[in-house]
Image (cartoon, coloured by chain):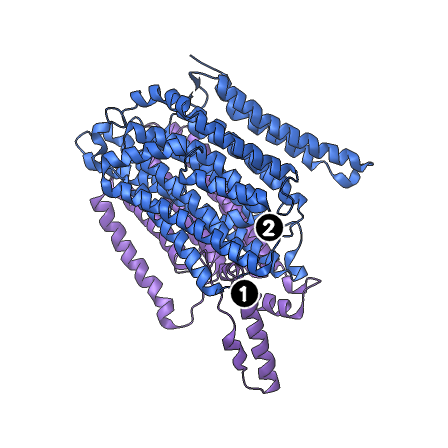
């Protein structure tokens, strides 16, 4: 059945982004009344948010597939893509808030909120294209676009000339986000190349059925490319920089793009027969999770040793950024394991964990933007990290249990590696919290602040916390909605 | 592209490699010329657009005189002048061995490409795979050797990798690439060139230097202290004083993100 709404899910964010860009390009200094400029800004934000919400609605209503004859493309909405795109749009909405909040905070190194908004719209459109299109190579190339959009936001000029003001901290933050953008674009290009090469090799296998090596090479390249593209360890170098210096870009990259690529990876592998999984590369996910744990613990240990009880707020903030990045890398490692495990429970867990990552990352990033002594920051950070670690009663629990089940069925060593990674990251968070409390007591920092003060960022954090609980309660229905697709996917059928 | 140091020469080498790849891709047609001619045309336009973006950036970055900007301190002007004296590639040849070892690695990589094209043909013909492996290895070497120091090598390396992937799409694709694929391949590379060019200008304007070493030093918080050390040493030299021992007792800066 041809459903034209599928095409509109791709076009709606693009059109909304273009409309907002037109509103933002109206020269403000030529307007007679300043309020008009303010209303134009508000109208642009409404258009952008509306675009994302309409796309979400279209995704919820659309069914079947659509053939775009002019381009020779077939768009199909599968259950994992539907769930992931709706979750990714939520992350993109959160990124809009974060970009806007950064602009209001007047931090010298930050860029304009409009850049973040336009990148979010382009990302939304390209993610929809990447997850709906059936051609693997085109899908991979579509998903390179969001990386370029995020890199553009990351390297965008700051709102003030930081070098002229001699503000070393602002210049360091600017350097962090530019470095993060350049690393991101490099890793994205390399990962894209690997996946395209793997997809081409796998596509040639049906033409030469005797050459199993070609297929296994293709699968290995796709698995390695996924590891690079989703920013799992050891390719998580840009994550801490972006979390610390460009929260809007981080929410887009780590909250929307990386989880969407995990789900896209499952869709790319799905048509490949389960009997050909002898080249299973699931250990990559387990190794990535373990490395994330080791890196997190190392960051805490080296900071505590070097600071020797005299760490300042910047030290604590840097180590928190690193722990946020490693928690996200841990979750992507688990999700990658689920995808590559070739099992039904693993695949379901991977999709559910990706959906949870899209909702937990904005919570973590938003909480890290608040003053570290505030109650909102502590609660948001704790719940965001716990969710990514798969703690009970939060969104990631059900998914983590499913992937652990797949790992237990595959190998005890792989399960041990995954759990060791989680324990190490959890231990790092606990050690950092204890250390921060010691420091706060030493310095006499105010702990309570104004816990019930409300501003847009706190509202966002509250909504995301509620979403975590909702996701935990809805995990059964989500798994049920995935069941029929998973049962028909050759990559995972017939296993567990 | 790997051994050259001057930015415009690197771009010239990249353009030559790109045109050669387009020529190899044009030779892959299977009797049906029309789609391949379109693909060839798109490749040429992509090459020209990407190289033009990078070339204009090189020209404008070199033409700008940051040290003449208002509001800079004398120390910042000195840094800008020092950066302007460098060739912009960020690559430095301090001795003969540093100049020759990239050439030795290039020769080894060339031989490796020959071997790979013979062993791993992936179902395509050997000549095409040789072009693919050489492109891939040249891009990888540009990235590994100088990609973390020089924006031009970073751009050239990434574009070479993406060019190799494009050739692979032409060589291994089960059908001729359609309009959507050609468009995405083309836009991806032009956008990559544009983003890196933009980052290059940001580096020049906000860090007074296009060398990526400077960026990573500022990021890890060590640029301020190294600049201060240079200035202290220069002042002491001018005054004929011995170097201060306090410099050695500066607190060690720990980089968490490296």
**Disc 1: CA contacts within 10 A as few (<14), some (14-19) or many (>=20):** some
Give the left or right position of residue A461, taking residue A454 as reference. Answer: left
Chain ID for label 1?
A: B
In the image, which is nearer the foreground, mark 2 or mark 1?
2
- Near-viewer residue (B44 or A471): A471
Which residue shows up at 64% across the image and 50% down it? A107
Q: Quadrant of the N terminus of chain A?
A: top left
- Near-viewer residue (B128 or B204): B204
Give the left or right position of residue A437, taking residue A426 as reference. Answer: right
Which residue shows up at 36% across the image and 46% down it? A423
**Disc 2: CA contacts within 10 A as few (<14), some (14-19) or many (>=20):** some
Which residue shows up at 62% across the image and 44% down it? A102
Report which residue position mark 2 lands on.
Answer: A447
Give the left or right position of residue A495, taking residue B74 as reference. Answer: left
How far apart marks 2 and 1 lie (CA) works out to 34 Å
What colour is chain B? Answer: purple
What colour is chain A? Answer: blue
Report which residue position mark 1 lands on.
Answer: B223
Depicted B112 relative to depicted B70: above or below: above
Q: Position of residue A430 (x, y in %)?
A: 44, 50
């Amino acid at each position: 059945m041809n459903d034209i709404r599928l095409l509109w899910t791709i076009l709606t964010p693009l059109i909304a982004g273009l409309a907002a860009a037109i509103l933002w390009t109206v020269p403000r200094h030529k307007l007679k009344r300043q309020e008009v400029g303010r209303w134009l800004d508000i109208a642009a934000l409404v258009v952008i948010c509306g675009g994302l919400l309409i796309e979400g609605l279209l995704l919820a209503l659309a069914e079947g597939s659509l053939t775009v004859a002019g381009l020779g493309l077939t768009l199909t909405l599968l259950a994992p893509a539907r769930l992931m795109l709706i979750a990714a749009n939520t992350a993109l909405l959160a990124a809009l808030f974060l970009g806007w909040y950064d602009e209001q905070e007047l931090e010298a190194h930050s860029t304009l909120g409009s850049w973040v908004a336009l990148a979010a719209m382009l990302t939304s459109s390209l993610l929809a294209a990447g997850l709906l299109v059936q051609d693997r190579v085109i899908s991979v190339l579509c998903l390179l676009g969001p990386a370029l959009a995020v890199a553009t936001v990351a390297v965008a000029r700051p709102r003030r000339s930081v070098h002229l003001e001699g503000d070393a901290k602002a210049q360091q933050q600017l350097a962090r986000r530019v470095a993060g953008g350049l690393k991101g674009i490099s890793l994205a290009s390399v990962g894209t190349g690997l996946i395209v090469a793997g997809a081409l090799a796998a596509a040639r296998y049906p033409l030469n059925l005797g050459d199993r090596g070609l297929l296994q090479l293709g699968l290995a390249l796709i698995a390695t490319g996924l590891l690079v593209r989703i920013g799992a360890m050891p390719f998580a170098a840009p994550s801490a920089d972006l979390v610390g210096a460009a929260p809007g870009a981080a929410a887009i990259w780590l909250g929307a793009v990386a989880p969407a690529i995990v789900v896209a990876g499952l869709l790319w592998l799905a048509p490949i027969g389960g009997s050909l999984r002898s080249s299973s590369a699931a250990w990559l996910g387990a190794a990535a999770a373990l490395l994330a744990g080791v890196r997190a613990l190392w960051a805490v240990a080296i900071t505590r040793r070097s600071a020797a009880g005299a760490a300042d707020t910047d030290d604590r903030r840097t180590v928190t950024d690193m722990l946020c990045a490693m928690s996200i890398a841990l979750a992507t490692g688990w999700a990658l394991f689920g995808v590559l495990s070739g099992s039904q429970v693993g695949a379901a867990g991977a999709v559910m964990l990706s959906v949870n990552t899209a909702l937990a990352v904005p919570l973590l990033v938003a909480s890290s933007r608040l003053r570290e002594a505030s109650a909102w920051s502590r609660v948001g950070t704790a719940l965001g990290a716990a969710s990514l670690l798969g703690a009970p009663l939060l969104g990631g629990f059900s998914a983590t249990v499913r992937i652990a089940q797949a790992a237990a069925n595959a190998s005890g060593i792989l399960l041990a590696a995954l759990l060791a990674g989680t324990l190490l990251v959890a231990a790092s968070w606990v050690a950092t919290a204890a250390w921060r409390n010691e420091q706060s007591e030493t310095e006499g920092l105010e702990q309570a602040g104004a816990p019930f003060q409300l501003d847009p960022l706190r509202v966002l954090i509250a909504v995301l916390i509620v979403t975590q609980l909702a996701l935990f309660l809805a995990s059964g229905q989500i798994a049920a909605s995935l069941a029929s697709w998973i049962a028909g996917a050759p990559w995972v059928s017939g296993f567990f | 592209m790997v051994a050259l140091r001057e930015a415009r020469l690197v771009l010239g080498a990249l353009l030559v490699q790109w045109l050669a790849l387009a020529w190899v891709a044009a030779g892959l047609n299977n009797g049906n010329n029309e789609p391949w001619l379109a693909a060839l045309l798109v490749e040429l336009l992509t090459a020209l657009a990407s190289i033009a973006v990078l070339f204009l950036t090189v020209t404008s970055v070199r033409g700008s005189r940051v040290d003449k900007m208002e509001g800079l301190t004398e120390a910042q002007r000195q840094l800008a002048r020092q950066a302007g004296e460098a060739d912009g590639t960020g690559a430095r040849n301090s001795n003969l061995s540093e100049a020759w070892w990239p050439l030795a690695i290039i020769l080894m990589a060339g031989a490796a490409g020959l071997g790979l094209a013979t062993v791993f043909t992936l179902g395509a013909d050997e000549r095409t795979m040789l072009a693919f492996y050489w492109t891939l290895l040249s891009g990888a070497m540009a990235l590994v050797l100088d990609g973390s120091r020089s924006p031009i090598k970073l751009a050239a390396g990434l574009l070479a990798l993406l060019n190799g992937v494009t050739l692979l799409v032409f060589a291994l694709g089960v059908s001729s690439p359609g309009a959507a694929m050609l468009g995405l391949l083309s836009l991806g590379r032009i956008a990559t060139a544009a983003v890196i060019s933009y980052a290059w200008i940001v580096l020049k304007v906000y860090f007074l230097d296009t060398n990526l070493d400077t960026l990573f030093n500022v990021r890890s918080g060590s640029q301020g202290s190294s600049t201060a050390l240079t200035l202290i040493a220069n002042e002491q030299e001018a005054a004929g004083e011995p170097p201060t021992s306090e410099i050695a007792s500066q607190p060690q800066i720990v980089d968490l993100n490296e």
